[in-house]
Structure formats: C-alpha cells, structure tokens
Image: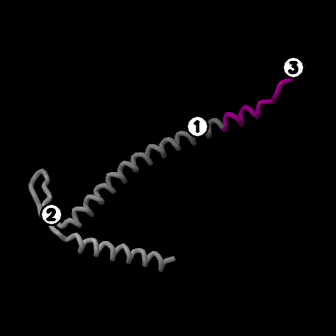
Amino acid sequence: MKVFGYFFLLLVIVLGVTFAILNATPVSVHYYLGTAQIALSLVIVCSLFIGFLIGFFMMFLVVLRLKSEKRRLKKRLKVTEQEIENLRAIPLKDEH
C-alpha cells in the first residue's frame, strides 16, 4: 500500500509543478494597501489555501457544537438509564 501512496504523492507533485510552469505569467493583484505582480499559479494556490482555511474553521465550529451536544446527550442517557434501573428495583405491590 505504501507504493500507491508514494505514487500518488509523486503524481500530485508532478501535476503541481506542471501547473506552476503553465501558469507562470505574472498578474497584477490589487489589494487595499497597494499592487503587486505575482505569478498566476501562486494567486490560484493562495486562493485555494485561504478557502480551505475558512472551510476548515467553519467545520471546526460545527464539530465543536456537535461534540458538546453528544456529551450532553450521553449525560442525559446515563441519568435516564439510572432512573429505569431504579424503577425496575422497586417491588410491585399487589392490591389483592
């Protein structure tokens, strides 16, 4: 399985290098404090990376909320199971 991992890594590196070579044309990037000439491939990769970071942060918040809810539900389940065990331990009284 390691061979497939190394092959995939090599493929990604080759594709990345060819992408950078094909898109090496400098473009003007205008931002709030000025302008810069940056390679198009670098602009695309930076945009993808920033999008990844924003998506990761948003999913991190969702995961934290779900873990909190899971913890709360586990606690509630434990209390409910204990209550059921207590009810089962009470002897039944027959009125006859």
Q: Position of residue 17 (x, y in %)?
A: 28, 75
Element on which disc 3 rests: loop
Q: Which residue was labeled with disc 2? A: 27
Q: Position of residue 58 (x, y in %)?
A: 37, 48
Element on which disc 2 rests: strand
Name the outermost residue toward the right.
96
Circles 1 and 2 in contact, beta carbons < 8 Å? no
Which residue is drawn at the image coordinates 33% and 77% (left, top)? 14
Which residue is drawn at the image coordinates 57% and 42% (left, top)? 74
Element on which disc 1 rests: helix
Tell me the CA gap for discs 1 and 3. Answer: 34 Å
Label 1 neighbour load within 10 Å: few <14, some 14-19, many 20+: few
Magenta residue span: 81-96
Compare marks 1 and 2 and give the one earlier in the sequence.
Answer: 2
Position of residue 11 in the picture relative to residue 25 (left or right): right
Circles 1 and 3 in contact, beta carbons < 8 Å? no
What mark, if any, has residue 76 been given in the picture? 1
Which residue is drawn at the image coordinates 44% and 48% (left, top)? 63
The amino acid type found where label 2 is placed reads Val
What mark, if any, has residue 95 been given in the picture? 3
Depth-wise, is mark 1 or mark 2 nearer the camera?
2
Identify the image quadrant of the C terminus. Answer: top right
Q: Position of residue 39 (x, y in %)?
A: 18, 67
Q: Position of residue 70 (x, y in %)?
A: 52, 44
What mark, if any, has residue 34 been given in the picture? none
Image quadrant where residue 12 sits: bottom left
In this picture, is 28 found above or below 19?
A: above
The amino acid type found where label 3 is placed reads Glu
Tell me the CA gap for discs 1 and 2. Answer: 58 Å
* Foreground of the two, 50 or 21: 21
Tell me the CA gap for discs 2 and 3. Answer: 91 Å
